[in-house]
Image (cartoon, helix red, strand yellow):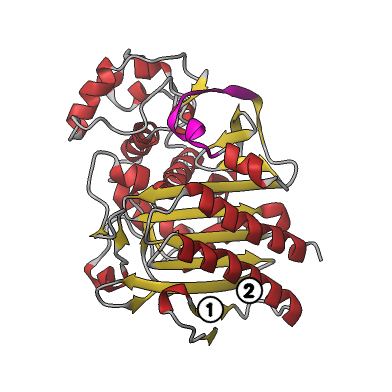
């Protein structure tokens, strides 16, 4: 791997390093355009929102580019690298969805099953009217965005779910929800007879080729774990909570997430049944406006105008219930499709986007929860440049 270091002051606004994979040779002018596009978009993003550190990874036709900006810790001035661990927030939901798809490929569960099949305490409750697909697509009937503050254990959550009253029939509306995807992850762990974190760390990640991703960061990797910074610029890390591992608990690196993106771009390289699991997360099940909701990933026809992408990720879509139209049969990608997912914790922000038909993808990790529209604006600009390069 060739590394080029740019010494540009001030440090917080500079690209401290980028690495160009030897996987494929690219013409200098095309590479320069990619580098310039990413540099301009993400350096400006970092400066505008006072982000201490960022890691960006780009793939185009198998060539990998890594960019590192700023510091992982203000206290130590440790520079960000492609191996720095960031909290990826709700991008974790894609791994939960992939694990559920993997369990289905193994015959351990079916997305047509209902929660009560695995959790006796939920049999004949309102949530049991939904199936596992509804849980994975946030269409169970109106589960809230967050686990209620009063719920502090799985036992208390079971009581809450027993008493929960839906706002709509299963499949009628989409309401983005941590408890929804969290319950899917929990049921998957029950079906596979193992702890959720163990399944992710010892089964799923290795099969995807991810060797620096964790739910529980081991002591040997803590030095690589960035500090996040909240609105007051105080150092923070994610707090434990009910269904935290399932909904927002993964910590990963730009290098690992780019490997995950490339596995999604070319799942045929994976061994079965993990190949089927990844492919099944690309199926679309519900249409909400111009966005199609799959398991974990949110989908759009590509190319897509920036304003349409922003509309699909507005506060209205994220925080409110929206009418959903179930796609019958489910929609397998038959045209160029953008798959994407954002994630946030109190001190971190992440965005992952890729277009398999164009063989392009972008990973953005930051140790500050910068505004979601800003992430999209920067990444969209880079995707446009990558798409132009991929078409050559």
Q: Is residue 274 visible?
A: no
Residue 324 shown in magenta = yes
Q: Quadrant of the C terminus?
A: bottom right
Q: Secondary structure at mark 1?
A: strand
The magenta stretch is 313-327
Side (left or right) of 250 relative to 111: left
The answer to whether marks 1 and 2 mark residues whose Cβ atoms lie closer than 8 Å is yes
Query: Closer to the N terminus: mark 1 or mark 2?
Result: 1
Q: Which residue is mark 2?
A: 35
Inspect the magenta stretch and tell me whether residue 27 lies in it: no
- Check the image and report above or below for 369 versus 321: below
Q: What is the x, y in percent for residue 141?
A: 43, 19
Depth check, front residue: 128 or 94: 94
Q: Residue at x 62, y 43 (%)?
A: 309
User: Helix, strand or loop at disc 2?
Assistant: helix
- Please tell me in which quadrant of the rendered image residue 12 appears: bottom left
Give residue 209's position: percent from left, percent from top. Answer: 48, 64
Taking depth in this image into account, of 179 and 380 the one nearest to the observer is 380
């Amino acid at each position: 791997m060739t590394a080029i270091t740019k010494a540009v002051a001030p440090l917080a606004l500079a690209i401290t390093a980028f690495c160009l994979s030897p996987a494929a040779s690219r013409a200098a002018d095309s590479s320069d355009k990619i580098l310039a596009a990413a540099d301009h978009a993400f350096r400006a993003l970092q400066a505008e929102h006072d982000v201490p550190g960022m890691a960006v990874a780009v793939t185009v036709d198998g060539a990998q580019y890594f960019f590192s900006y700023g510091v992982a810790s203000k206290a130590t001035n440790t520079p960000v690298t492609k191996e720095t661990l960031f909290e990826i927030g709700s991008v974790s939901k894609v791994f939960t969805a992939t694990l559920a798809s993997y369990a289905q490929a193994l015959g351990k569960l079916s997305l047509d099953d209902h929660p009560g099949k695995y959790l006796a305490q939920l049999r004949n409750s309102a949530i049991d009217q939904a199936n596992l697909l509804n849980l994975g697509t946030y269409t169970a009937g109106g589960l809230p965005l967050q686990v209620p503050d009063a719920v502090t254990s799985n036992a208390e959550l079971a009581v809450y779910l027993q008493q929960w009253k839906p706002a709509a029939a299963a499949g009628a509306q989409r309401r983005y929800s941590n408890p929804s995807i969290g319950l899917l992850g929990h049921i998957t762990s029950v079906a596979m007879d193992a702890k959720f974190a163990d399944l992710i760390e010892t089964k799923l990640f290795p099969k995807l080729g991810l060797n620096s991703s964790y739910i529980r960061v081991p002591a040997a990797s803590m030095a690589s774990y960035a500090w996040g910074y909240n609105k007051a610029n105080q150092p923070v890390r994610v707090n434990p909570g009910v269904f935290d591992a399932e909904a927002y608990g993964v910590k990963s690196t730009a290098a690992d997430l780019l490997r995950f993106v490339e596995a999604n771009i070319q799942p045929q390289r994976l061994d079965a049944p993990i190949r089927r699991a990844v492919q099944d997360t690309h199926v679309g099940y519900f249409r909400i406006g111009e966005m199609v909701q799959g398991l974990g990933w949110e989908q759009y026809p590509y190319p897509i105008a920036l304003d349409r992408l922003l509309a699909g990720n507005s506060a209205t879509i994220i925080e409110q219930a929206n009418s959903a139209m179930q796609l019958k049969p489910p929609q397998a990608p038959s045209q160029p499709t953008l798959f994407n997912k954002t994630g946030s914790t109190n001190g971190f922000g992440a965005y992952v986007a890729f277009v398999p038909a164009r063989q392009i993808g972008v990973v953005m990790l930051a140790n500050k929860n910068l505004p979601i529209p800003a992430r999209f604006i920067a990444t969209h600009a880079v995707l446009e440049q990558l798409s132009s390069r991929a078409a050559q």
